[in-house]
Image (cartoon, rainbow, N blue to C red):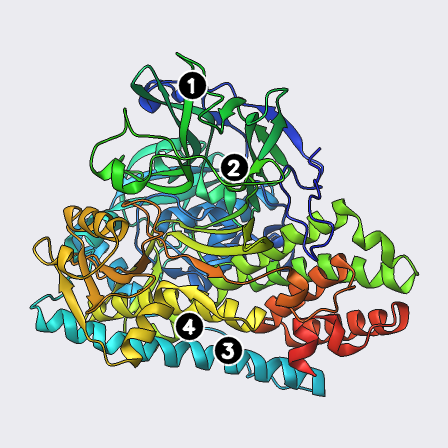
């Protein structure tokens, strides 16, 4: 069982330094030092899916477990999107209301399984003309059910709605202000983004066709809901393989692994103390947590760290490692841990892989690594708090989204946070909410909700903008978001740092008429602005971010310029920023930065092949990482960050923070208003706090 260790009783928020209070089944990793390609048998693989959800079952019941109605639903209500293999699975396809032929087939199979109708899978190929019909269908969106504009029926609902609309307006206006100068700078440099994929790629992906057959007596009848005029029994492709289940190689795959660099006698090697492999389709809606368990040694500055990964209700404990965080305590010939990274290795069905990296700590530093000086570089001592390296106090909430995320999941987490809190207060048991385990559980909900809110808002705004511009934007591979919290110490005071990291975008923007490159550019800017504004409005504090630095330079009249290997050393940047930009340029990315030195430095990185755009600063973690970090500065404790009273119960603070995040997104207006009123009523009656003392959400709404 995971537990929370509270090291800062004075903080309103307990950081889960060791483990979080959730009942988990524990699996111990047996992953040794080796080339990853030679150690696939040592990677932990657990059966998914990892998120408990009844949406498929409820849909099957709504359809009466009827074959024809199930077929019609997938054909008529799930629009076409073109990408490789099985990405979203049944639940992700249902939530997205879109998918390719493989994912639509998986959804139909899940409905047939609920109806206990025998079925099997068919793999085949479409001819080019038929494949072109699928590609064309992607740009003819299925008419969605008209959703009425939300109408507030109370002052609380109106306050929530006003806050949500103001939040979206700030994001869009900020993004619009930054897109134009970036596009002009690219145009002046003669750079025109050519969005991937082209028509040839879309056709090739569409030709790989998947459908079902169901058993009717002694016959097997084809079920292919991929085309709008399809009928049961109709065949569109040439059958090549018939299988009881789809093969693993047809699925997108993800390995989450911890890489630790060690050095002994001048020799550097990598080991992988923890590795977990699964399908993004099995991670839909799943909460993933990463942290460390720290065990002190009888020798000061020497400790044992164990990387821990929780996926749903499964906990994976990696191999323990000894860390010597002192030059004086190093022994001759001893093995030194020089760095640790959390890696996401993404494998497409066509076999090619992409790796993105989240640095946990690096005792050598980016500049020396870029110079190739690793074997002999002096190791930095990691800053500590409570005799533990600060870098190891972090709790990382990971969200893998192969498609859209249902707003119902947001509502479930809201209820899970607010209801127990309000019930405990009403029952006169408010003190129990200040328990470390309860606070740790609320912290997990809070981080996960920031993740969910970011993705939901980004998807909603991107879809609205894409529709207005006549382009299609969608997930062609899984998006990976990380929200982390760790303790920091500055000027003798403890601080809480929250970071929002987009590690992998995964979205694709395409258009039959052209112009998708600009839309892809705009989405990258929108993502960067969104995460900054979300934290600014959540905490009502200044937020340090790459997009904020770039916006400040623009407000001062500083124009963007294209950075090259010839002028990068002439911009007055730090050695770290220069090294990171040179690495980006070597990866054939376009870099645009404001003229003149900025502190901290920030720049845009643009992939000229796709238009994918990222705001980056010198704290960027790795050249292959699509990441921008938002840091909440000057947070002495969460109470001051969310305008809680200094004596406020920590559990109540976190529950109201959860509510504040959700009201920014405003998914279910009535539900949020009920939760808000219930929590406020319980706090006011059971604890004696007034509205202004309760939370950021109360302070904003009243």
Please tell me which of labels 3 and 4 falls first in the chain. Answer: 3
Tags 3 and 1 in contact by the CB under 8 Å rule? no
Which sits in the foreground, 603 or 327? 327
> Mark on residue 41?
1
Front of the two marks 2 and 1: 1
Query: Is residue 29 shown above or below 413?
Result: above
Front of the two marks 2 and 4: 4
Q: Position of residue 282 (x, y in %)?
A: 50, 41
Query: Is residue 387 shown above or below 519?
Result: above
Q: Residues within 10 Å of mark 1 (few under 14, many from 20)?
A: few
Q: Which residue carries the number 3 mark?
A: 167
Front of the two marks 2 and 3: 3
Q: Which residue carries the number 2 mark?
A: 217
- C-alpha separation, residue under disc 3 versus residue under disc 1: 48 Å
Which sits in the foreground, 547 or 412? 547
Q: Position of residue 38 (x, y in %)?
A: 33, 18
Residue at the location (24% across, 81% down)?
557
Please tell me which of labels 2 and 1 falls first in the chain. Answer: 1
Q: Residues within 10 Å of mark 2 (few under 14, many from 20)?
A: few
Q: Which residue carries the number 4 mark?
A: 461
The reply to whether residue 415 is visible in this rendering is no
Front of the two marks 3 and 4: 3
Q: Position of residue 462 (x, y in %)?
A: 38, 70
């Amino acid at each position: 069982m995971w537990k929370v260790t509270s090291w800062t009783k004075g903080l309103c928020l307990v950081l889960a330094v060791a483990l979080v209070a959730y009942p988990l089944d524990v699996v111990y990793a047996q992953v040794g030092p080796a080339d990853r390609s030679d150690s696939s048998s040592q990677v932990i693989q657990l059966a998914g899916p990892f998120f408990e959800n009844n949406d498929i079952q409820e849909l099957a019941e709504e359809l009466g477990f009827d074959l024809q109605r199930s077929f019609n639903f997938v054909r008529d209500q799930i629009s076409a999107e073109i990408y490789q293999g099985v990405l979203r699975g049944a639940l992700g396809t249902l939530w997205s209301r879109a998918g390719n032929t493989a994912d639509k087939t998986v959804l139909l199979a899940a409905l047939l399984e609920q109806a206990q109708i025998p079925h099997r899978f068919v793999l085949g190929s479409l001819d080019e003309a038929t494949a072109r019909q699928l590609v064309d269908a992607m740009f003819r969106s299925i008419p969605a059910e008209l959703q009425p504009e939300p109408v507030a029926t109370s002052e609380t609902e109106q306050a929530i709605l006003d806050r949500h609309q103001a939040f979206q307006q700030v994001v869009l206006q900020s993004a619009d202000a930054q897109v134009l100068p970036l596009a002009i700078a690219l145009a002046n440099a003669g750079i025109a983004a050519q969005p991937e994929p082209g028509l040839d790629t879309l056709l090739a992906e569409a030709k790989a066709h998947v459908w079902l057959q169901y058993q009717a007596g002694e016959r097997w009848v084809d079920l292919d809901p991929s085309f709008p005029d399809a009928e049961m029994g109709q065949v569109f492709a040439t059958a090549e393989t018939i299988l009881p289940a789809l093969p693993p190689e047809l699925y997108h795959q993800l390995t989450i692994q911890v890489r630790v660099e060690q050095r002994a006698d001048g020799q550097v090697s990598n080991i992988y103390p923890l590795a977990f492999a699964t399908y993004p389709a099995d991670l839909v809606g799943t909460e993933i947590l990463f942290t460390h368990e720290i065990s002190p040694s009888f020798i000061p500055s020497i400790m044992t760290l164990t990387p821990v990964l929780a996926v749903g209700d499964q906990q994976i404990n990696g191999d323990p490692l000894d860390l010597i965080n002192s030059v004086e305590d190093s022994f001759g010939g001893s093995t030194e841990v020089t760095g640790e990274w959390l890696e996401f290795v993404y494998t497409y069905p066509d076999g090619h892989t992409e790796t993105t990296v989240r640095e946990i700590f690096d005792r050598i530093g980016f500049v020396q690594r870029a110079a190739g000086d690793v074997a002999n570089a002096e190791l930095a001592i990691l800053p500590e708090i409570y005799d533990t390296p600060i870098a190891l106090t972090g709790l990382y909430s990971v969200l893998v989204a192969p498609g859209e995320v249902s707003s119902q999941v947001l509502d479930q987490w809201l209820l899970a946070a607010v209801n127990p809190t309000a019930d405990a207060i009403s029952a006169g048991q408010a003190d129990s909410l200040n328990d470390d385990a309860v606070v740790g559980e609320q912290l997990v909900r809070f981080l996960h909700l920031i993740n969910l809110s970011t993705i939901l808002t980004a998807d909603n705004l991107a879809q609205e903008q894409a529709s207005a511009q006549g382009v299609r934007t969608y997930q062609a591979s899984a998006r990976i978001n990380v929200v982390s919290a760790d303790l920091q110490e500055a000027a003798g005071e403890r601080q809480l740092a929250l970071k929002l990291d987009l590690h992998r975008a995964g979205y694709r923007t395409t258009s039959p008429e052209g112009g998708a490159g600009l839309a892809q550019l705009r989405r990258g800017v929108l993502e960067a602005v969104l995460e900054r504004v979300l934290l600014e409005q959540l905490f009502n504090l200044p937020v340090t971010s790459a997009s904020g630095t770039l916006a400040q330079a623009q407000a001062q009249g500083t124009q963007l310029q294209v950075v090259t290997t010839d002028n990068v050393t002439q911009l007055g940047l730090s050695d770290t920023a220069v090294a990171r930009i040179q690495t980006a340029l070597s990866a054939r990315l376009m870099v645009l930065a404001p003229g003149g030195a900025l502190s901290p430095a920030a720049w845009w990185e643009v992939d000229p092949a796709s238009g994918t755009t990222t705001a980056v600063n010198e704290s960027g973690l790795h050249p292959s990482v699509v990441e921008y970090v938002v840091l909440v500065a000057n947070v002495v404790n969460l109470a001051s960050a969310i305008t809680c009273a200094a004596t406020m119960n920590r559990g109540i603070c976190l529950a109201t923070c959860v509510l504040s995040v959700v009201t920014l997104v405003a998914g279910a207006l009535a539900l949020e208003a009920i939760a808000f009123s219930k929590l406020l009523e319980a706090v006011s009656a059971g604890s004696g706090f007034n509205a202004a003392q309760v939370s950021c959400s109360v302070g904003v709404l009243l």
